[in-house]
Image (cartoon, grey):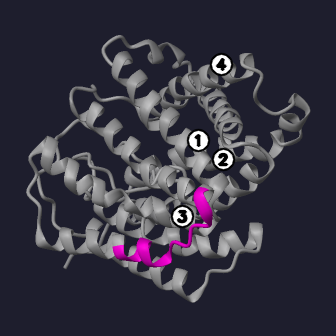
Amino acid sequence: MSRPSPTHAATERAGLLFAGLCAALGAFSPGFAKLTTNALDGLSVAVVTTAFAALAGLALLALRGELARLGDRRALPRLAAMGALGTGGAFFLFFQGAQRTSAIETALCLQVEPAYSLLLARAVLGHRITGRRVAAAAGILVGIALALEPRGLSGALGVACLLATPLCWQLSHLIALRGLPAVDPRVFATARYVFGGALLAAVFAARAVAGGGPPASTVAAQVPVLALQGVVLSFVGTLLWYETISRLDLARATAIVVPSVPVLSLGASFLLLGEVATARQALGLALAAAGVLAFVTAPDAARPRAGVPDLHPPTGAEAPAAVAEAGPGD
């Protein structure tokens, strides 16, 4: 058996490092979402977080002389739609949900995404449904149902928002798969935050005109942590995912990162908020993580289509297994 070349080995080590960093950032995202929504309402957190992520992306493209690539007329309509749905709509729901639930429940609810991908891949893309994927999705749903402990109407609304968040991501992937040209990951990530942020800013402005929203001083006090959440956890987390899958095959990268996030989030939530999972929540998380692992390591239901980038970095505000033919969760 031939040994891998030094160059290949170095690439693999770098990929594993990026995968570990990606999982770590993803694990801290639910805790930070809860931390920031304890201080501000969910819409304000979504707007400022997305704005910082968009600014980071624009700065990176400007430094590389690539700002003009955001105006590619072939990709612009679909990038705008994906940003509005996959970032604008998803972030709105995510932070509304985090505001009303615990960080542990936030991390757990996002694991429902493979169930959506299973149904949408069949209904829209015609992919076959395998027994293994059905069993894996069932395990995820049982784990989520077991661990959730919503408190009152507000808690139930928060859970509903979080469970709906991955549906926005999945629908945004379908927009890409229906004709988005191949786009550089840096341009793609920036466009999503720019267009998603524009939608959120419009909603925020409409609320302000109606007399709602927090005082500017309250928002200003949270700018440092919101900047960290937007630049590091969101935008850098996106880039780390792309760096990972450029060095490791997608199935392996997904299998390493995706099930790790909800498990690692237990430690992150304790460090940030002092949250400790109950025995019931721990069991539910274990079931959900096992289901996700079984799902993402299942054989492909359809051969991936060339030229479509993986569109779904598994940062905490964007859960992992995509319906896209770009991932093993299709």
Q: Nearer the viewer, residue 122 or 23?
A: 122
- Give the image location of residue 186, x and y in percent: 48, 33
What residue is at 65 percent from the left and 76 percent from the top?
267
The residue where tag 2 is placed is 232
Q: Please identify, in this view, whether the residue under mark 4 or under mark 1 is nearer the observer.
A: 4
Q: For the residue carrying disc 2, how many other residues have a C-alpha within 10 Å: few (<14), some (14-19), or many (20+)?
A: some
The residue where tag 1 is placed is 235
Q: Please identify, in this view, whether the residue under mark 2 or under mark 3 is nearer the observer.
A: 3
Q: Compared with residue 172, is residue 206 higher up or lower down, i.e. above or below?
A: above
Residue 308 lies in magenta, yes or no?
no
Residue 145 lies in magenta, yes or no?
yes
How far is disc 2 from disc 3 in space, using C-alphas? 18 Å
How far is disc 1 from disc 3 in space, using C-alphas? 19 Å
Question: What number of labels is visible?
Answer: 4
The residue where tag 4 is placed is 206
- Give the image location of residue 70, x and y in percent: 47, 18
The mark that comes first in sequence, 3 or 4, is: 3
What residue is at 51 percent from the left and 70 percent from the top?
262
The mark that comes first in sequence, 4 or 1, is: 4
Q: For the residue carrying disc 3, how many other residues have a C-alpha within 10 Å: few (<14), some (14-19), or many (20+)?
A: many
What residue is at 83 percent from the left and 43 percent from the top?
222
Q: Are marks 1 and 2 in contact (CB under 8 Å)?
A: yes
Locate residue 118: give its quadrant. bottom left
How far is disc 1 from disc 2 in space, using C-alphas? 6 Å
How far is disc 3 from disc 4 in space, using C-alphas? 30 Å
Q: Compared with residue 322, is residue 285 higher up or lower down, i.e. above or below?
A: below
Which numbered disc covers residue 107? 3
The mark that comes first in sequence, 2 or 4, is: 4
Left or right, 112 with respect to 25, comes to left
How far is disc 2 from disc 4 in space, using C-alphas? 28 Å
* Extent of the magenta region: 142-153
